[in-house]
Amino acid sequence: MFVTYPQTKTYFPHFDLMFTAYPQTKTYFPHFDLQHGSAQIKAHGKKVAAALVEAVNHIDDIAGALSKLSDLHAQKLRVDPVNFKFLGHCFLVVVAIHHPSALTPEVHASLDKFLCAVGTVLTAKYR
Amino acid sequence: MLIVYPWTQRFFDSFGNLSSPTAIIGNPKVRAHGKKVLSSFGEAVKNLENLKATYSKLSELHCEKLHVDPENFRLLGDILVIVLAAHFTKDFTPACQATWQKLVGVVAHALAYKYH
């Protein structure tokens, strides 16, 4: 998906959407301007999307590719694991809205599997 | 909870030494906080018909000032059930557990209710 639709790298709506659909996720960003489409949300969404691209490019070793991010989440950020499911879900919703025909059941399953794997890697060092 | 789900320590930087299970168990601030939280559960039991109102201010506090992800309320609830099970062993019947799961569920829900 990132290869076929490189513009996905600039999709920041998934974070904005997550804050609206799952307002409790905002508790991790008290230092952000959380108005819709704020510069901080956009920048953060872009950062996350870039990490996902990195993971896609190393799909056979996601743990290796995201090792530093995994450390960061375990030691500093400590985002509760449930939230990775929320973000993954919002990401899928954004894809569904923008590329409905591309999101066949097989692609949906693949993407979901990938996003779950990323979440697992990011929380792998929690304990 | 601080031991089993160590990422929950993120809210307690001011509590001092949480570096090991022994440190956590012996930490006076942890003990005091546990007492506060359990007392609050006691209030819940006394106000079962009116939980949302009972927890309204606490809910706002946890959202607006403490910035606590409500998932933590669910985690704490599960830990409480396990502690009760270990304490009461065979007296902690399935019916008991079901009731307690329901209670911790509604408390978590009430605490998350004012989140925005």
Image: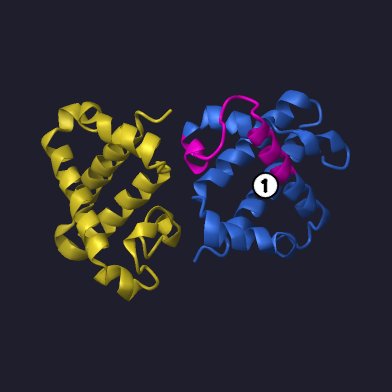
Chain colours: A blue, B yellow
The residue drawn where x is 67% and y is 31% is A39
Residue A5 in view in this figure: no
Number of residue marks: 1
Q: Nearer the viewer, residue B54 or A115?
A: B54
The residue drawn where x is 32% and y is 73% is B23
The residue drawn where x is 32% and y is 51% is B76
Quadrant where the N terminus of chain B is found in the figure: bottom left
Determine whether, in the image, residue B71 is placed left or right of residue A72. left
Amino acid type, mark 1: Leu
Residue B46 in view in this figure: yes
Determine whether, in the image, residue B77 is placed left or right of residue B11. left
Residue A65 in picture, x, y percent from top left: 75, 61
Residue range (magenta): A24-49
Quadrant where the C terminus of chain B is found in the figure: top left
Q: Main secondary structure of the magenta part?
A: helix
Q: Which residue is mark 1?
A: A115
- The vertical placement of B15 against A39, above or below, is below
Q: Which chain is mark 1 on?
A: A
- The vertical placement of B61 against A53, above or below, is above
- The vertical placement of B12 against B109, above or below, is below
Residue B90 lies within the magenta run: no
Residue reaching furthest to the left: B46
| The image quarter in which residue A108 lies | top right
Residue B57 in picture, x, y percent from top left: 26, 31
Residue A52 in picture, x, y percent from top left: 74, 48
- The vertical placement of A39 against B43, above or below, is above
Q: Secondary structure at mark 1?
A: helix
The residue drawn where x is 64% and y is 28% is A38
Determine whether, in the image, residue B80 is placed left or right of residue A99. left
